[in-house]
Image (spheres, grey):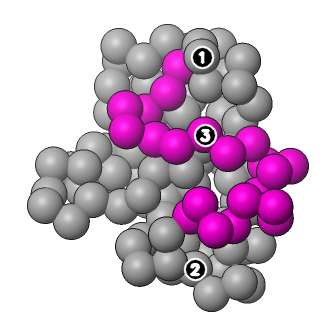
Amino acid sequence: MQHIRPAQLRERLQEADVPFLLDVREPWEHQLAAIPGSRLIPMGQIPARLEEIPREREVVVYCHHGVRSMQVAYYLAHHGFQVTNLHGGIDAWSLEADPGTPRY
């Protein structure tokens, strides 16, 4: 499984070929804090909503601390997606990449 640090992801988001950002937290969490441009599909809905996730792009999955997203990343990889897990989740994103993102 590939991992990406928040600072690396911040750099990748400045490039022309940006990854698909998949937030697998719950809606209330997404409302508190989210990485701009991310798509919310809660972890429990992933199997039923696979068609909403592009297969032709790299998918970067994140959650609060990186545990749920790791499980989803393994699931997606098993189903043929090119997937990377955001190390430390949105909490690490707030600490390392964007201090303006609220922590909870």
Label whose residue precedes the other's in the sequence (2 or 3): 3
- Is residue 31 in view? yes
Question: In this view of the protein, which residue sits in the foreground, 20 or 92?
Answer: 20
Q: Secondary structure at mark 1?
A: helix
Residue at figure coordinates x 66%, y 34% from the top left: 64
- Residue 95 on image: x %, y %: 43, 26
Question: How many other residues sit within 10 Å of disc 3, few (<14), some (14-19) or many (≥20)?
Answer: some
> Can you identify the residue that label 2 sits on?
81
Question: In this view of the protein, which residue sits in the foreground, 50 or 32?
Answer: 50
CA gap between label 2 and label 3 equals 17 Å
Task: Say whether residue 36 is magenta.
Answer: yes
> Can you identify the residue that label 3 sits on?
40
Residue at figure coordinates x 72%, y 18% from the top left: 28
Label whose residue precedes the other's in the sequence (1 or 2): 1
Total numbered circles: 3
Question: How many other residues sit within 10 Å of disc 2, few (<14), some (14-19) or many (≥20)?
Answer: some
Q: Is residue 75 left or right of residue 93?
A: right
Mark identifier at residue 22: none
- When the figure is inspected, residue 57 is found, relative to residue 63, above or below; the finding is below
- When the figure is inspected, residue 80 is found, relative to residue 7, above or below; the finding is below
Task: Say whether residue 40 is magenta.
Answer: yes
Question: How many other residues sit within 10 Å of disc 1, few (<14), some (14-19) or many (≥20)?
Answer: few
Q: Amino acid at mark 3?
A: Leu
Label whose residue precedes the other's in the sequence (1 or 3): 1
Q: Secondary structure at mark 3?
A: strand
Residue at figure coordinates x 35%, y 13% from the top left: 100
> Can you identify the residue that label 1 sits on?
31
Question: In this view of the protein, which residue sits in the foreground, 35 or 103?
Answer: 35
* Extent of the magenta region: 33-53
